[in-house]
Amino acid sequence: MTITPFAARFEANPHAKSDAEREAILADPGFGTHFTDHMFVADWTPDEGWQDPRVVPYGPITLDPSAAVLHYAQEIFEGLKAYAHESSIQLFRAEQNAARMQRSAHRLALPPLPVDWFLGSIDALVRADHTWVPSGGERSLYLRPFMYASESFLGVRPAAKVTYSVIASPAGAYFKGGLKPVSIWLSTTYTRAGAGGTGAAKCGGNYAASLLPQQEGIAHGCDQVVFLDSIEQTWIEELGGMNLFFVQSDGSIVTPALTGSILEGITRDSILTLAADLGHDVTQRRVSLDEWRTGVADGTITEIFACGTAAVVTPVGTLRWDDGEVTCGTGEAGKVTSEIRSALVDIQYGRAEDRHGWLRPIAGPPSA
Ligand code: PLP
Ligand code: COI
């Protein structure tokens, strides 16, 4: 199966890591600190469209100091993983990432990247760096496509020169504690995204806005921050980089409905399907802060978990605020959380049947 719409120019990295260096990294990759030998790059202008697809040595980018992205943050990104199966490398719902990148591009007035360019760019990079896909354990190759305004111009308007790139980073667990529940700081001073803003787009600015509240959370001994809606300060939206699910004592599962300011997680969407497959009643609706606090206290909420590509499915324990806290669970992943997590990762790693057609092999032989 070849869907790649282009033959990317290839420039081999003369300083590629040795087999021994790479194997040492793959044995304990951590998250987001090591990168493969190559990166994918393509450029866009209004007249020429997307052009010059290339796989080149991973390395610094040269930008003019007036490049628009450095001033007005016209930038979007994606996150997905490549999984080593016995005799292939597979992507999980990559076309969903392609579609979301198009929605993000629209919101940030960036040019849409055609789906076959998105998938083709990933195929080209993963083919070039296929030896970097870790196998064994819950390891994968995290792929980070991103697009930014590279035009040198200080006027405030959409850039007429845009760069799209993909880098890849071998990944182990996002949280060092493994499946230990994370603690959450309730941000009441800051919101992540406002009505009509960019919350549903995966743009760098959303993450920049989450850093100060995240620092505040860390200062209060928490791992992550949960944000409320910006209008009523009442409804649970999501964490800085993950969506939330609540398991109720009757086995039903609730997740905050998409409001336009929540990122539409692909893991979230997959879990909605998998939880229903497993026989749970699943609802998307508004969930209030009070429901979280009282539900945990009176036992109506029995498990809480967060989900996303990087963190997969992570149990949530304590919710802390200025003068109080509630803790859900006993310090271990709950039964339903574990069941859903396994259902998801078993498909991703090829241990369970892919009944929904979510996997897609990297096109072409690894050596092509
Ligand atoms: N919410 C935010 C703000 C995120 O950054 C992410 C991560 O990508 C998610 C949710 C989960 O999305 P996905 O499951 O597509 O990775
Ligand atoms: C992801 O899960 O892919 C994310 O983007 C979350 C975070 C690393 C930004």
Image (cartoon, grey):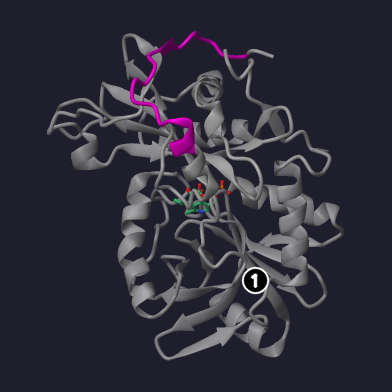
> At which x and y percent is residue 282?
76, 60
Judging depth in this view, the residue of 10 and 193 nearest the camera is 10
User: Which residue is pictured at 52% across the width and 43% down the height?
Assistant: 26
Residue denoted by label 1: 304
* 84 is higher (above) or lower (below) than 324: above
| 81 left or right of 165 in image | right
> At which x and y percent is residue 15?
34, 25
Judging depth in this view, the residue of 339 and 103 nearest the camera is 339
> At which x and y percent is residue 236?
53, 68
Q: Amino acid at mark 1?
A: Ile
**Residue 94 seen by the camera:** yes
Judging depth in this view, the residue of 35 and 289 nearest the camera is 35
User: Which residue is pictured at 38% across the width and 80% down the height?
Assistant: 220
The quadrant holding residue 21 is: top left
Residue positioned most to the right: 279
**Residue 143 seen by the camera:** no
Considering the image in quadrants, where does the N terminus appear?
Answer: top right
| 29 left or right of 359 in image | left
* 131 is higher (above) or lower (below) than 272: above
The stretch of residues the image draws in magenta is: 3-22
